[in-house]
């Protein structure tokens, strides 16, 4: 018994050494496993497909030069007091007559769709005016000036050669429910006017003249006057919350004739 006690007396220093070795081995095993290279998990076909599907798509910039804004036969032609038609006596060669409107064939399909969808929803708008030739616009303008004077007339009627109607892309709509509101501000509150204001852009037509934009477009509010620009441009203008062609294309406008 004395021998055992004597041996333990001289071997006590081995205890911390052995404990240190045990701890070192444990740490080596733990960190060695973490640092060991691992083979990456192969992505399944399903996972790869999902990854591609959820990757955000980039939308290309809208091409504002796709169509001319000065060619009178262009779907995007801008006509205002600073930008007359060139030549001023221009007459489109693709006019078609449909549902009471005389318009460019470029607007035909979308106009038909809009008219049919409106009727299906029990909305029956009429056509007050569509294409007007240079001579027709001249007669209308001269009649107004004889009644209201040129200064007042210029706030609501275009001079010949400066009218969107001459392109065959503009339509003045009327109401079948409140005919007294034709060519009047109250058209905007009619069933037809409200429907057009809400849905016309879906078919490529934009409301061209509004009170807040008079200093830009040059004309008083006309809730009945819609201009066809095509679905692509109408959708982009709505997306960007831009209401006038002048602002969208960065073109001059205003109330003074060039």
Image: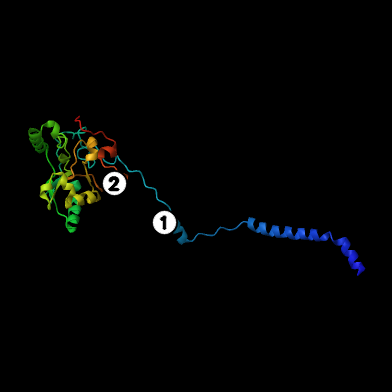
Point out residue 122 in the picture as x, y percentages from the top left corner. Answer: 16, 57
Task: Name the secondary structure under disc 2.
Answer: helix
In which image quadrant can residue 221 be found? top left
Q: Which residue is mark 1?
A: 53
Give the side of residue 29 with respect to residue 226, left or right.
right
Above/below status of 253 relative to 185: above
Asked whether disc 1 touches disc 2, contact meaning CB atoms under 8 Å apart, the reply is no
Question: Closer to the camera, 145 or 203?
Answer: 145
Q: Is residue 118 visible?
A: yes
Q: Is residue 70 visible?
A: no
Above/below status of 7 relative to 93: below
Point out residue 152 in the picture as x, y percentages from the top left corner. Answer: 14, 33
Q: Which residue is mark 2?
A: 238
Q: Residues within 10 Å of mark 2 (few under 14, many from 20)?
A: few
Question: Closer to the camera, 93 or 12?
Answer: 12
Gap in angstroms between the C-alphas marked 1 and 2: 27 Å
Can you tell which of label 1 and label 2 is closer to the viewer? 2
Q: Please give the name of the residue rendered at 16% of the width and 46% of the height, measured from the top-left corner.
A: 186
Q: Earlier in the sequence, mark 1 or mark 2?
A: 1
Question: Closer to the camera, 17 or 193?
Answer: 193
Q: In what quadrant of the picture does the C terminus appear?
A: top left
């Amino acid at each position: 018994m004395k021998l055992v006690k004597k041996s333990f007396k001289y071997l006590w220093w081995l205890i911390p050494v052995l404990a240190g070795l045990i701890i070192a081995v444990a740490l080596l095993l733990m960190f060695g496993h973490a640092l060991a290279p691992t083979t990456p998990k192969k992505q399944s076909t399903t996972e790869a497909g999902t990854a591609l599907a959820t990757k955000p798509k980039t939308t290309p910039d809208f091409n504002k030069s796709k169509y001319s804004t000065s060619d009178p036969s262009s779907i995007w032609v801008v006509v205002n007091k600073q930008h007359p038609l060139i030549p001023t006596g221009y007459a489109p060669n693709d006019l078609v007559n449909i549902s009471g409107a005389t318009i460019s064939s470029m607007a035909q399909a979308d106009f038909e769709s809009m008219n049919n969808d409106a009727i299906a929803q029990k909305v029956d708008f009429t056509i007050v005016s569509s294409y007007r030739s240079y001579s027709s616009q001249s007669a209308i303008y001269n009649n107004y000036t004889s009644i209201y004077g040129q200064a007042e007339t210029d706030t609501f009627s275009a001079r010949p050669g400066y009218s969107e109607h001459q392109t065959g892309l503009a339509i003045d709509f009327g109401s079948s429910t409140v005919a007294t509101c034709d060519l009047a501000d109250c058209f905007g509150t009619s069933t037809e006017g409200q429907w057009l204001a809400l849905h016309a852009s879906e078919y490529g037509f934009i409301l061209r003249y509004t009170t807040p934009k008079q200093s830009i477009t040059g004309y008083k509010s006309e809730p009945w006057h819609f201009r066809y620009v095509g679905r692509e441009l109408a959708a982009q203008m709505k997306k960007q919350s831009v209401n006038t062609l002048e602002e969208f294309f960065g073109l001059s406008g205003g109330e003074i004739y060039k």
